[in-house]
Amino acid sequence: MKTIETKTFVRNKFLEYYEKHPSSIQPPTQIEKREFGFLLFKERVMIRHKGFKNVDDLAKTLKTLVPSDVYYSSAYYEKPEEEMGEKGWLGADLIFDIDADHIRTPCAKIHDKWTCSNCGTAGKGVVPEKCPACGEQRFDEKTWPCEVCLESAKAETVKLLDMLTRDFGFSSKEMSVSFSGHRGYHLHVESREVQALDSMARKEIVDYIVGIGLETSFHGLEERGQKKSRVLFGPGLDDSGWRGRIARGTYEFLLTATSEELGEIGLKKKVVDTLIQHKETILESWKEKGPWGAVKDVGVESWRKIAQRGAEMRSAKIDTVVTTDIHRLIRLINTLHGKTGLKKIEVPITDIEQFDPLKSAVAFKEGTVKVLISDAPEFRLEDQTYGPYKNREVELPTAAALILLCKGMAEVKEEK
Amino acid sequence: MAKYPFTNEAAEHVRELDLKIEDMSEPILTRAEQRIEEALLYAEVSTQLPKDEIEIASFPVAVMMVASTADTLIKGRYALAEAKRAYKLLNEEQDKNKILEIAGAFNWKIRLADKRPPYEFALSFMDYLKNATRLQAKEWKLVNRVVANGEVYLTKDDTTRLLEEEVRRHIEKKLDVKGKFALPENVAKRVERLEQLSVKHRGKIQFEELPEGIVISAFPPCIKDMYNGLSSGHHLSHIGRFALTSFLINAGMTTENVVNLYRSLSDFNERLTRYQVEHIAGGRGSRTRYIPPRCSTLRTHGVCTRMDEICKGIRHPLAYYRRKLRTIETKAPVERA
């Protein structure tokens, strides 16, 4: 039996996809003002500064270049093909990137692997700061688009959507959400207004979303009145913006917080005990003015720590660099992801809770491939669960085989 | 119009009068000169209102005079002083509609919002950000504001303060004329006097040169950590590398020495590193030398991990370096690299 080189095989599959589905390529708005970039399979180099007049030219290029990944600029340029300084920046969409890599998930221990680039020592879970064997800090990482990770990324996206809608007032027409095809979600805001935002303004929006620099004293958590008759006030559950979010986060935190978790945020033992003891009183208090000042011996400083933790629970963990970069290249919708062979697809905003990325993003629906799998975790694609596999030869549906091939976890034996 | 001479309405009025700089009356020129003098000496233009015709026309004349100096310090000071004057006058307005009117002159999307005391206005977050990002106090951070439905809720004082910023930006834009240009002799004489006044007043505030050697002990904590880390082979984030490299270049380290610093990394690529360092130093492509990001940006991207006492008083890593150097210089000797 002839073994086929993996890269060539994957590239051929990608070519097949772009040949069969030329009409699925959706051009970004004002395609002629965007810069495009393509990552090549073999050379692993990025071809940048490409421009297209229309979507047909773009679709043709995909068929000839067959890139592993396709990107376009969030920015609009007068001359997208020129060098960076000469492009003539006209504006940029407001974009957000949520990646499971930025969220600590318990399952990372099961499916994420790292190998030290220097000595080859390997381990599971989050990459350590230094290699335990040789002290080197360069690693080869293998992450996995697992369900738990994707769910937590989706939960962050829902929080982000809520802020953009309720606080910033963007309509669902101005926003689009997509699954990246790997481990995250992208959210684009396209409107004339936001295009002009400079990097500083975008940074302020990022800080708002992540809660950087948030101080509860500016959100109504304060003591009022004179010395002996001092009363604590705090935000309410129905308040607008961060106020309501702080209150709801505080509610959520205190509902389930254990003594250890309360201790971790820097509360004194006595305060922790009081809070645990008066849990009922605190939960009841939300019906009126909230827990602030509802229990004796918990002072304003303690409440600040609790409210900060509550705020953290309501913030959305976005990639701060992507949003502030006004020249960013971002993956094009309906193109394939080189790390999975899945496609980046639009997520219906109103139906995001029901959205199943491992079903909707499958690009290859036909055929099977016989592969030799070195090591792969258990995973699901569409309605089928596969693995875990270790040093096994298996015949898999094309999409399932591709994800392992793209991840470097398997080799092709034979295609049917 | 005399109160707020920077509005389009006032500018239109002056245009209709069809006044030429050559035949401006003495009182107008005197008031124009006074506006600038007050800016240079007291950082605020007085709110005294002589005859309206004089007050209105004196503003564009003053702008022309300041622009002709091609001196960024005079320009900045004048714009700020006029803005402060506007802030004071706006704060004295009892009628909130007057504030809406001036905000409207700058195309702000703003409305009265008195259902949520202590707030009196609701401003679109876009207009808010345009003006608030340059204000450094924590209370101006968007995350510390009540934001709902695309609007930021503001007190009257918040609103006038943001308008001050808008006025300042507006006047700075008007003053942004490249190079010197000629004015009639009687006007030029007044400008010359003001320039001398500015030089005298500037006194000892000279451009601060950094010393030749690099003083590591004066590095801010973020830079020190990255510098030490890099020396022992630690990898840095992209923005971390940029911050460190641009800091060292601006502190006077040679490209060669910066490149050598990266040598300890396992994936060191001399050609690429040299290219990147030279680019930041302004020796390639755009020819602009980059400066490190400001502290708030480093915080956003997680480069700032610990702050010391000096950090609390500065907003930029290079400002930290200058300040620390001053305190160190009195006690020699210091470690120099």
Image: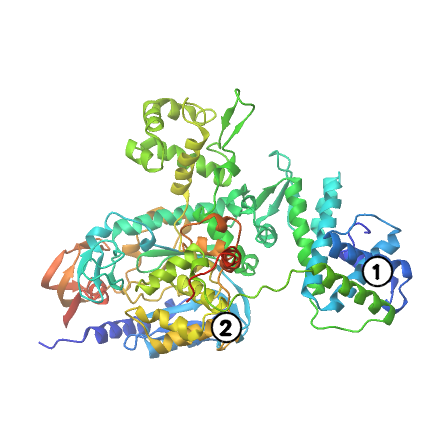
Q: Residue at x 42, y 39 (%)?
A: A308
Q: Amino acid at mark 1?
A: Val
Q: Which residue is mark 2?
A: A32
Q: In which image quadrant can residue B58 be found?
A: bottom right
Return the chain for callout 2: A
Residue shown at the point (68%, 50%) measured from the top left: B164
Q: Which residue is mark 1?
A: B14
In-image side of B84 versus A309 (left or right) = right
User: Which chain does the numbered disc 1 sit on?
Assistant: B
In contact (CB < 8 Å): disc 1 and disc 2: no
Q: Is residue A56 visible?
A: no
Residue A183 visible somewhere in the drawing = yes
Residue A68 in the image, given as x and y percentages of width and height: 31, 71
Please check whether the numbered discs 1 and 2 fall on a single chain: no
Question: Where residue B178 appears, x then y in whole percent?
Answer: 69, 71
Q: Nearer the viewer, residue A184 or A303?
A: A303
Q: Quadrant of the N terminus of chain A?
A: bottom left
Q: How many marks?
A: 2
Q: Quadrant of residue B32?
A: bottom right
- Please provide percent x and percent y for residue A358: 27, 55
Work out whether A253 lies above or below B21.
Answer: above
- Tag 1 secondary structure: helix
Q: Comparing marks 1 and 2, which lies closer to the viewer?
A: 1
